[in-house]
Image (tube, helix red, strand yellow):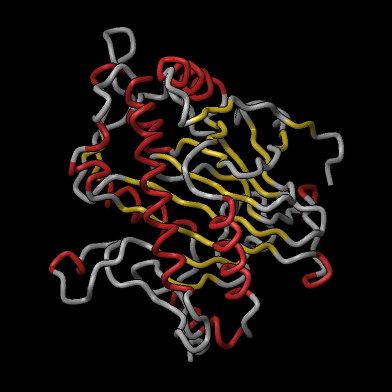
Amino acid sequence: MESSISRTSLNCISLADPEIQKSVALLKQACLDSGFFYVVDHGISQEFMDEVFAHSKKFFDLPHSEKMKLLRDEKNRGYTPMLDEILDPDNQVNGDYKEGYYIGVEVPADNPEENRPFYGPNQWPSEEVLPKWREVMEQYHREALRVAKSIARIIALALNLHVDFFDRPEMLGEPIATLRLLHYEGGQKTDQVSNPAKGVYGAGAHSDYGLITLLATDGVVGLQICKDRNAQPQVWEYVAPVKGGFIVNLGDMLERWSNCIFRSTLHRVVLDGRERYSIAYFVEPSHDCVVECLPTCKSEANPPKFPPITCSAYLSQRYKDTHADLSSYSNSKA
């Protein structure tokens, strides 16, 4: 463990603050500085958050054979086993010491949209195995999307765009929004305490793919950020959990959109051996949305740094780069 790593301080934005320009200023400074900030007063009760975490734990407590029946499919819905994901192959000796569960926007199998990447029916544990589980997760998915849209409106203003820029159908009107439950086993189960010097991480260093990520955590610290990825050596800082709030960070897609004015920051999970649960909510625009330099983020002195790309093409490549090939599990799924 790197015990000398300090904790960073992040701006805190209240969605209940009537002074919107204050929130815009706080968010803009955070996006320029680190790409990370806290969001509180979001309207999701602590009681419901506790219920979502309790249901998450119930799933991960199931026998491995039961979880493997719900192994993620080609639409990236379902269970991801320990070591399935390797986010930092240059520095990790194995994959991430975490297991997860993906839940996307529910699209019925007979819907014409179902044949698109990231759209389709979710995989759900049976009611007999986990009563109310689907109901709780679908409600959380809806609530988190509402919060994400509120944050996106503040981001739009911070980028000198119209407040409803991201509300349009091709943006967050029909989003690729993905809820991911995460469980990091404690060292007593895996004999693996995070050790960056030896290439062992709860989650390797990475930046998120999409627009924004909302992260809810339990009280166990583990998330670290690196504000300058090019520094040698890199300086890592812990982000403290925030009770009742979200840790929000910008993804690569928003950095690309803003022509690198806003920051998508490297982060990783380094654990001290304690078990940890977190819930990430990844928000991306619709499949056909073309991500290209925003008009307010370019000039003669600062021309666009990236070519246009559709959201679907960009995300498909990023998932392929970081997840194990599903064929490697061909004998494991019951």
Residue 53: image x %, image y %? Answer: 60, 62
Q: As displayed, is residue 324 above or below residue 6? A: below
Left or right of 327 on screen, residue 224: right
Relative to residue 213, is residue 81 drawn left or right? right
Q: Quadrant of residue 244?
A: top right
Q: Which residue is drawn at 30% across and 66% down?
A: 106
* Residue 65 rendering spot, x and y as whole percentages: 58, 88
The residue lying furthest to the top in this view is 301
- Residue 118: which quarter of the image? bottom left
User: 201 left or right of 111?
Assistant: right
The residue under the point 50% across, 73% down is 79
Tell me the quarter of the picture where residue 172 sits: top left
- The residue closer to the viewer here, 82 or 179, is 179
Relative vertical location of residue 61 with respect to residue 215 in this rendering, above or below: below
Residue toward you, 106 or 88: 106
**Image position, residue 43 (x, y; %):** 47, 43
Residue at 22 percent of width and 63 percent of height: 116
- Residue 85 percent location from the top left of the image: 55, 62
Q: Which residue is drawn at 76% across and 53% down?
A: 271
Q: For the view shown, which residue lies furthest in the right direction?
A: 3
Number of marks in the image? Answer: 0
Q: In this view, does 102 lie above or below 147?
A: below
